[in-house]
Amino acid sequence: MSKDKHRFPRDAFRVEPGKKVKLKDFDPADTQGIKDKQHGKEALLDDISELAEAQSLLWANSTRSLLIILQARDAAGKDGAIKHVMSGINPQGVDVYSFKAPDDEELKHHFLWRPMQKLPARGRIAIFNRSYYEEVLVVRVHPSFLDRQVIPSRLAGKPLEKLWEARYDEINRFEQHLVDSDISVIKIFLNVSKEEQRERLLDRLNEPGKLWKFSAGDLAERELWDEYDRAYEDMLNATSTEAAPWHVIPADKKWFARAAIADLIVSKVRGLKLEPPQPTEEQLAGVEKYRQALGG
């Protein structure tokens, strides 16, 4: 099978920096011409194989690293995407972090302090299942969460819009610093429709084996759909930059979302143009001796 047989036009997913977008501009059921689940699985398998090779180069070089940020509404498929997309790579080189509500110690620090502790070392991949973006999403929709936070004195008493703008700016500068430090950043928003989310929540309720995934809080957040729409749109428009653009991946078809994510990651790592490390003179000098010792 040709390596490029199932490639997707990434411009269809990328939020162009400086261009204002609305979520209605992105179809959650889009499959970019991939006919069915079987073809989606074939595309995913192709990219999983390539990703394993790319990760080996990333690990061997130990000069670059990769940060993957996944944001989405409840039941959009973040956990499943991580499980399936990363299934073929060496787990020793990947770290997955799930960011819950900050604890008392974390609240004493700047909101970017927590993710700073989890950045990938050179040669590694880190996946943030939700991230510091919750501070301009969930906290924006639920401003009462700010009661436990310390607002910078320069913003105290000012309209909340000033706080969100300040956080967008801090995030952009933070991510630019990461990229300047050879940490490539891939930002993915899994875009699920309201109807598809309803079906998935019902599925959790109707299947005993999936009931543990359901939370009453999911329904409460669902009631705030329009508020989240505005928060996501403002986030995408304010923080999709040349250094770290957002990608809005259609998520109504899980098989397509997984294939598109894998393809995006492979493309990013391939774009680093990594080569196998060159052997040292000492290693080359010892090759013949080692070969003889092994009877080769």
Image (cartoon, rainbow, N blue to C red):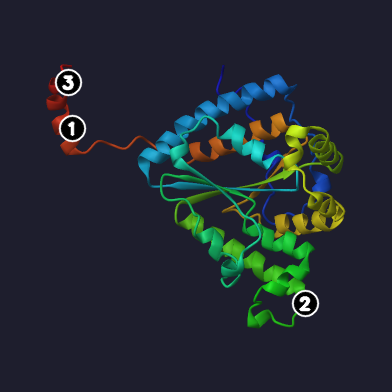
Viewer-nearest residue: 250 or 87: 87
Q: Secondary structure at mark 3?
A: loop
Viewer-nearest residue: 72 or 74: 74
In terms of image quadrants, where is residue 112?
bottom right
Q: Secondary structure at mark 1?
A: helix
The amino acid pointed to by label 1 is Leu
The nearer-to-camera label among 1 and 2 is 2
The nearer-to-camera label among 3 and 1 is 3
Among all residues in the image, which is located at the extreme front?
208
Residue 76 visible to an observer of this rendering: no
In terms of image quadrants, where is residue 81?
top right
Total tally of numbered discs in the picture: 3
Q: In the rendering, at what x and y percent does residue 245 appear?
A: 63, 50
Q: Please name the residue that numbered disc 3 is placed on.
A: 294
- Using the image, tell me which numbered label, if any, was put on residue 159: 2
Mark before the other along the chain sequence, 2 or 3: 2
- Considering the image in quadrants, where does the C terminus appear? top left
Q: In the rendering, at what x and y percent does residue 260 appear?
A: 65, 34
Q: CA distance from mark 3 to mark 1?
A: 16 Å
The amino acid pointed to by label 3 is Leu
Q: In the rendering, at what x and y percent does residue 149 appear?
A: 66, 73
Mark before the other along the chain sequence, 1 or 2: 2
How would you rate the neighbour count of disc 3 (Cα within 10 Å): few for under 14, some for 14-19, many for 20 or more?
Answer: few
Q: CA distance from mark 1 to mark 2?
A: 65 Å
Q: Please name the residue that numbered disc 1 is placed on.
A: 284
Q: In the rendering, at what x and y percent does residue 276 appear?
A: 35, 34
- Using the image, tell me which numbered label, if any, was put on residue 268: none
Q: Secondary structure at mark 2?
A: loop
Q: Would residue 74 appear left or right of 94 to someone viewing this image? A: right
Mark before the other along the chain sequence, 3 or 1: 1
Above/below status of 208 relative to 139:
above
Q: CA distance from mark 2 to mark 3?
A: 72 Å
